Amino acid sequence: MCGPTPSAWSQVPVAIESPPSADVAMRMVYGGATWRDERVAAFFGGRSTTLRAEIREVFRARYVEGEVDKLMLVYQLTPGPRDQFRCDACVPALGAAVLAADEAGRWKLRARGLLLMPGMPGSGDEDLQLLQIADERWTLRSRRYDNDRGRESRSERLVIERNGEVQLAADLGFEDKLGALACGARAAPQSSGVSVLSPGVGPRVEIVLRFNEGDCASIQPVVQRTRLELREGRFQLVPDPLEKQDPDDDGPTAASAAGR
């Protein structure tokens, strides 16, 4: 009896290994559970270059992109044990990496960003999720929140894989806006959110920020909506159709896609 042809073998699905454990993945990304680098020393206030940041995996999610199985990993970095870095002003760093299964089903390091952005104040739990922004494209969403004696700060960060690196592609938010703890019922709730506008029009999202302007006596709620499109590794403002009008037309044009 004849065996399967080479083309038939090529159609047999490859069994993909189980994702590596947190310790194994950390060695693939950072070389171990600690990391010493000038960048991390500078992040934590220019401390000695001998500083070794401690690393902890805080997020992992598996997904498929371009018919390739991938694993998104996010790490929280602290200048010493995380349990000893819990003050209100203690801000950890975040790094991330993407592993991908090769043709033999083995997990390999595909991209990494060893130090991307600040994490949650007090080294608290990170607010992270994967968002599918197009049929073949995903982004990591990181939402950050801080409250300093009634003054609230929020930001939405979007992270992508590109050219062997994990990169911060968007960072929008507000800082030190008076909230209910400062002004009571006169202050409207403040929040941030991300909505996916694609597929169909390319990788597009809308970031919505709700915050208060003014002091407690004259506080007013503001809603800011910003539509962004992923181009050349960055989420950039979606072109406004009015900007394409006849240059001889003296009619009004919109400065951007953001509005209140």
Image: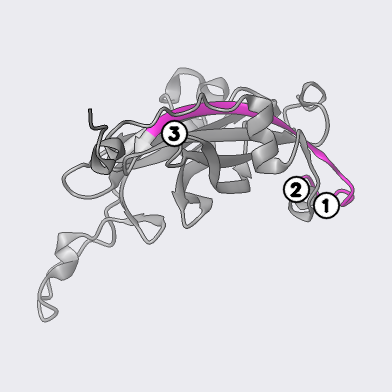
Between residue 30 and residue 207, name the one nearer to us.
30
Between residue 36 and residue 170, name the one nearer to us.
36
Q: Say which residue label 3 marks.
A: 219
Secondary structure under tag 1 reads loop
Residue 2 shows which numbered tag? Answer: none
Which circle, 1 or 2, is nearer the viewer?
Answer: 2
Whether residue 218 sits left or right of residue 242 in the image: it is right
Q: Which residues are magenta?
A: 44-63
Residue occupying the point 79% across, 55% down: 38
Residue occupying the point 59% across, 30% down: 146
Secondary structure under tag 2 reads helix
10 Å crowding of disc 2: few (<14), some (14-19), many (20+): many
10 Å crowding of disc 1: few (<14), some (14-19), many (20+): few
Q: Say which residue label 1 marks.
A: 46
Tell me: residue 56, above or below residue 247. above
Q: Say which residue label 2 marks.
A: 40
Between residue 33 and residue 94, name the one nearer to us.
33
First-in-chain label (1 vs 3): 1
Secondary structure under tag 3 reads loop
Tell me, yes or no, if residue 12 can be seen here: yes
